Amino acid sequence: MNAHPPSPALTVATSVHNGERFLDAAIDSVLAQSFGNFEFLLLDDRSTDGTAQIIARHAQRDRRIRVIPSLHKGRVAALNSLFDAARAAWVAIVDGDDIQHPDRFARQMAEIARRPDGERLVVLGAEVQMVGIDGQPIARPAFRRPLDDAGIRANLEIGAQLSHNACVVSREAVRAVGGYRPAYRHAEDYDLWLRLSEAGSMANLPDRLVDYRIYPDQVSSRHVVEQMRNTAIAWLAHRARSAGLPDPTEHIATMPPLEELDAWFGEGAARYVRRRILDRVIYSPEALSGDGWTALRDHVRRDGARGSRLWRAAARLVRAGHPIKASTIAAGLIGVPGLSSGA
């Protein structure tokens, strides 16, 4: 008699940190899928609320759920633990605050089965519907991700063309490229997509298959500057690998200071990263006066950047109650000697 059950067609992987507010609904939306041949891995990542109890209750009710022990080392380690524990060839990534449409897994697994074996598909994404805390749709400007591999690759520099929480990923491919990397905290998915793009093909389904919940205190809202910095560095590392050069971030645990990036990637690397950060935060007075301030100041002081959008950033700092920081930027823009190194 075989002691081990047959491997499922799909592994569903969810890491949760203090997710009791939305977790019941998120789990229920997985268990209600029309495609049922999956195992459901749930990992409680250092929660201090009722997350562990919610996971345990659902695990008692559905045999497809497996509770994965936490390493207590954060999200990247948790994601790698889930991929290590997965028994299926394909892993569906599910966030603990989102809602899966009932046919998400069926649609994605059917598309994977339809693809020829020689295509070497490594990740299949889908569109998402942005919703608020109450689950009501949020009106956003129309945005359509590229559907085929060529379109995704052509647009990768401007940002991830795959929504991490709506993707089904090849477990073998993820492990072959080294999994998620801790140095790319808050941009670990983008870094993974870039490395997977070097290993196989990528695609998106055009349909909205996940309700992606947006709210002010979620992690992606609190760490926008670090996320954008690491996104830009991931692109520099991808460009180095594509040119046949070593990836200087391959074995690091934390990122170097921005001023060291030119020595790592070549002249202009730090300027490129500062510009990418500013592209993301320049219209947010909160980000500019917080973690984005150093990138703004150095983009003017070190890079000699000029332009009307930087004057408008200085005006936003004044309106946000930061006149000294605003005057530092203004002094740099008009070329006053001795621009302060801090404000």
Image: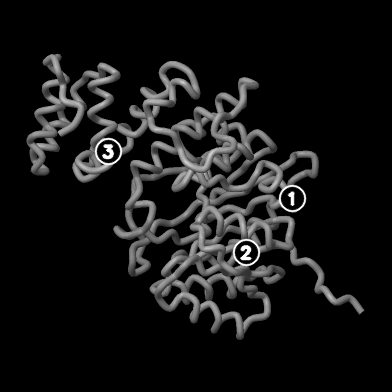
* Mark 2 secondary-structure assignment: strand
Q: Are marks 1 and 2 in contact (CB under 8 Å)?
A: no
Which of marks 3 and 1 precedes in the sequence? 1
Give the CA distance from mark 2 to mark 3.
Answer: 36 Å
Nearer the observer: mark 2 or 3; the answer is 3
Residue at horizontal 56%, vertical 36%?
152
In this rendering, the count of numbered labels is 3
Residue at horizontal 39%, vertical 45%?
142
Q: Nearer the viewer, residue 134 or 43?
A: 43
The amino acid on which the numbered mark 1 sits, given as a three-letter code, is: Arg
| Residue position for label 2 | 12
Q: Which of 252 and 177 is in front in this view?
A: 252
Give the image location of residue 180, x and y in percent: 58, 47
- Residue at the far right: name it: 1
The amino acid on which the numbered mark 3 sits, given as a three-letter code, is: Gly
Give the CA distance from mark 1 to mark 3.
Answer: 45 Å
Give the image location of residue 69, x and y in percent: 60, 69
Q: Which of 24 and 255 is in front in this view?
A: 255
Question: In this picture, is 4 found above or below 298?
Answer: below
The amino acid on which the numbered mark 2 sits, given as a three-letter code, is: Val
Q: Residues within 10 Å of mark 3 (few under 14, many from 20)?
A: many
Q: Quadrant of residue 22?
A: bottom left
| Residue position for label 1 | 114
Q: Residues within 10 Å of mark 1 (few under 14, many from 20)?
A: few
* Mark 3 secondary-structure assignment: helix
Residue at horizontal 53%, vertical 72%?
29
Quarter of the image with the C terminus is top left
Task: From the viewer's perspective, tell me whether residue 204 is left or right of residue 46.
Answer: right
* Label annotation for residue 292: 3
Residue at horizontal 55%, vertical 64%?
14
